[in-house]
């Protein structure tokens, strides 16, 4: 296992110089997978359907924790941007000075990180670019944009229960249902973990490639050891418009198309899942409303089909009026934790999670994504995810529990949600 850096670490807090240039349409960045360009030097990723940004190296980094983690990161980024010299020939989302972040779910414990890579490569539509970032008093890094060797698969992989085995976790779910029936709260999201251990240190680029291929409609991410393929966009802010994709209510797919269509219809009519979804949408809309001059909240969800499960989904959209003073990261803070990952009412639900869940979530179900110098960016929720360190990966899965929840069904749902990362680790 590798050693984690202590909180409050800062790397290169001085003035940065960022240069973005367009890449040739025939370059590997424009034609191939951006993941193929990643070296093993602190890789970061944010990709969906082949587009997005990847990076490597560390030009600057902040590691913090506690209840002020978002404010610490926002202040650090604002100061970094104010001092930076930026030359941007492309002017697309994800160009210029860009930071990647992953934030702890709870105030304590857990590290939160904001990092500025030395090199960022991006693609959007038919445009590709590269950004180099370095301290003003250091040489500009070499933008080595080429296809790398295929990373090796994990060797000798074994799996073991995390904090709780299945039986004990079902007891926790039953306890939560009892509390909900007793009127303590309406919904709580409970998570469990699974530990994968390899015989040798694992190269995180291997599961990233498999996740991006297997789940192209999700956002494949990696920042500081936290990786996965999330279907849930906590908040995207771009040029004055804001979007949040809410997922709550899940059913497992069978692999039979006709049967899955019937299951999708069942999900869309399920009172238990519709209730759970309504709580989540309401919490997002309430959090975004103070920042928007207008909003669109659909009356009914749609069914999002993923390779392993189907979800009830709603896209909440708005026009922001405070973009000059509130960044996408600050919007993410306002939204976190939503009812989709915490519960309803949120304070009671998160307090119950800390009492009965029996594990430290770390960055699981926290915001993960990127932000540019204008404050625009994309922040997903770190779901369908794992934390990689040395030769181990800690996998996470969670389920929304309401009054009608059945512990065995919730256990089966959690097992389905382990599948993306578990399969991605396989040879």
Image (cartoon, grey):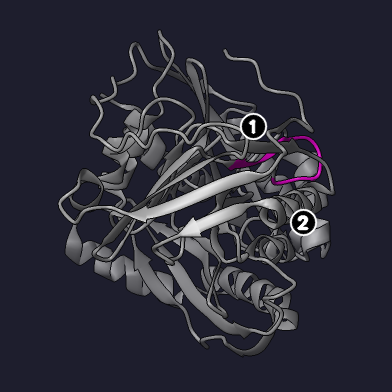
Label 2's element?
Answer: helix
Q: Position of residue 338 (x, y in %)?
A: 67, 63
Q: How crowded is mark 1: few (under 14 residues within 10 Å), some or many (20 or more)?
A: few
Instruction: Please state, as top left, top right, bottom left or bottom right, where the N terminus lies in the image.
Output: top right
State the residue lying farthest toward the left: 26
Highlighted magenta segment, given as a residue range: 105-115
Q: Which residue position holds label 2? A: 349
Q: Nearer the viewer, residue 347 or 35?
A: 35
Instruction: Please state, as top left, top right, bottom left or bottom right, where the C terminus lies in the image.
Output: top left
Query: Residue 22 vs residue 28: left or right?
Result: right
The prevailing secondary structure element of the residues shown in magenta is: loop
Q: Position of residue 186 (x, y in %)?
A: 73, 66
The answer to whether residue 279 is above or below residue 38 is below
- For residue 61: magenta? no
Mark 2 or mark 1: name the one nearer the start of the chain. 1
- For residue 110: magenta? yes
Q: In percent of the image, x 30 and y 26: which residue is there?
A: 426
Q: Can residue 382 be seen from the camera position used here?
A: no
The answer to whether residue 205 is above or below residue 301 is above
Q: In percent of the image, x 64 and y 52: which residue is there?
A: 84
Q: Which of marks 2 and 1 is in front?
A: 2
What number is the disc on residue 168? 1
State the residue lying farthest toward the bottom: 294
Q: How crowded is mark 2: few (under 14 residues within 10 Å), some or many (20 or more)?
A: many
The answer to whether residue 425 is above or below residue 289 is above
What number is the disc on residue 408? none
């Amino acid at each position: 296992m590798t050693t984690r850096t202590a909180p409050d670490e800062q790397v290169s807090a001085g003035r940065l110089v960022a240069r973005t240039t367009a890449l040739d349409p025939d370059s590997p960045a424009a034609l191939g997978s951006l993941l193929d360009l990643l070296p093993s030097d602190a890789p970061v990723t944010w990709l969906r359907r082949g587009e997005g940004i990847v990076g490597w190296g560390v030009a600057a980094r902040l590691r913090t924790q506690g209840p002020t983690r978002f404010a610490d990161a926002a202040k650090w980024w604002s100061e970094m941007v104010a001092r930076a010299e930026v030359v941007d020939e492309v002017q697309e989302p994800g160009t210029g000075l860009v930071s990647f972040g992953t934030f702890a779910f709870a105030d304590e414990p857990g590290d939160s990180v904001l990092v500025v890579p030395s090199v960022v490569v991006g693609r959007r539509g038919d445009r590709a670019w590269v950004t180099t970032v370095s301290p003003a008093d250091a040489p500009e890094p070499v933008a080595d944009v080429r296809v790398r060797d295929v990373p090796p698969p994990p060797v000798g992989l074994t799996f073991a229960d995390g904090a709780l085995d299945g039986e004990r976790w079902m007891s926790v779910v039953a306890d939560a249902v009892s509390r909900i029936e007793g009127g303590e709260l309406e919904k709580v999201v409970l998570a469990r973990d699974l530990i994968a251990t390899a015989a040798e240190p694992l190269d995180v680029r291997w599961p990233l490639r498999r996740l991006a291929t297997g789940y192209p409609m999700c956002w494949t991410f990696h920042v500081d050891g936290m990786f996965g393929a999330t279907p849930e966009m906590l908040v995207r802010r771009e040029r004055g418009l804001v979007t949040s994709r809410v997922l709550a209510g899940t059913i497992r797919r069978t692999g039979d198309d006709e049967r899955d269509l019937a299951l999708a219809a069942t999900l869309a009519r399920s009172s238990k899942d519709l209730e759970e979804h309504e709580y989540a949408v309401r919490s997002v809309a309430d959090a975004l409303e103070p920042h928007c001059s207008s909003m669109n909240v659909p009356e009914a969800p749609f069914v999002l089909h993923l390779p392993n499960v189907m979800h009830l989904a709603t896209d909440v959209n708005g026009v922001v009026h405070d973009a000059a003073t509130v960044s996408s990261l600050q919007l993410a803070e306002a939204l976190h934790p939503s009812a989709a990952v915490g519960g309803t009412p949120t304070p009671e639900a998160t307090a119950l999670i800390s009492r009965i869940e029996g594990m430290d979530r770390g960055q699981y179900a926290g915001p993960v994504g990127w932000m540019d110098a204008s404050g625009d960016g994309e922040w997903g929720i770190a779901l369908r995810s794992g934390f990689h360190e040395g030769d181990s990966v800690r996998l996470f899965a969670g389920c929304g529990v309401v009054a009608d929840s059945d512990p065995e069904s919730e256990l089966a749902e959690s097992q389905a949600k382990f599948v993306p990362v578990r399969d991605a680790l396989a040879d």
